[in-house]
Image: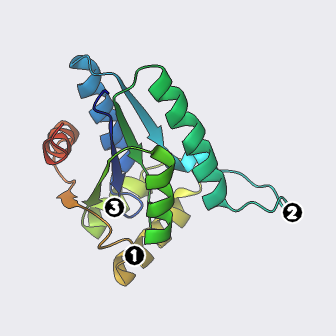
Amino acid sequence: MTDTRALLLTGAYGTGKSTVAAEIADVLEAREVPYAAIDLDWLCWSNVPGSGHDQHDILARNLVAMTATYRRAGVHRIVLAGSIQDSVTLDAIRDAVGMPLQVIRLTAPLNVIEARLGASPASGRADDLARAREWLIAGTGEGLEDAILENVGPVRATALRALELAQW
């Protein structure tokens, strides 16, 4: 059986999860490693009043389908990016991917997060900045990770360090 593994980049909003995941994908592609990169926010971004499904349920179901499709296509590494706040959500993600999952929590100082989110043209980023502040104050999502990685330097350096921590 092929060695398949997943890496979850988590952390407060604005810590660079999606950017680092995209850079990791670029590195894996250059190394000719069969991979998939998935931004978890996009798997549950919806508004379906009265459906009986919450975002966590939608995320898990979509992730099960996507990872199964990618594995059938020959993917060996799956890179996930998303802000995970509790062990229930993390356990659901572990179950959904169905392969060993390593969790790296990205961090950045608040002034860096403010600069990143403040520069975004998307109107929802102001809400993300407020949530980032709340998460940092409350310590939301802390303790769920296998490793912590500060993301303040060049994105390529952070991506390579994440791959090193994941032993990929």
The answer to which quarter of the image holds residue 36 is: top left
Pointer 3 residue: 113
Decide if residue 86 is in sight here: no
Residue in front for this viewpoint, 117 or 143: 143
Mark 3 vs mark 2: which is more N-terminal?
2
Cα separation, mark 1 vs mark 2, equals 28 Å
Image x and y of residue 104, in percent: 27, 55
The residue lying at 43 percent from left, 54 percent from top is 94
Give the residue type that dot 2 points to. Gly
Query: Which label lies toward us, 3 or 1?
Result: 1
Image x and y of residue 93, in percent: 48, 54
Pointer 2 residue: 50
Looking at the picture, does residue 140 appear above or below residue 59? below
Assign the C terminus to one quadrant of the image: top left
- Left-right relation of 29 to 83: left
Image x and y of residue 9, in percent: 33, 51
Give the residue type that dot 1 points to. Thr
Question: Which disc number belongs to residue 140?
Answer: 1
Residue in front for this viewpoint, 143 or 95: 95
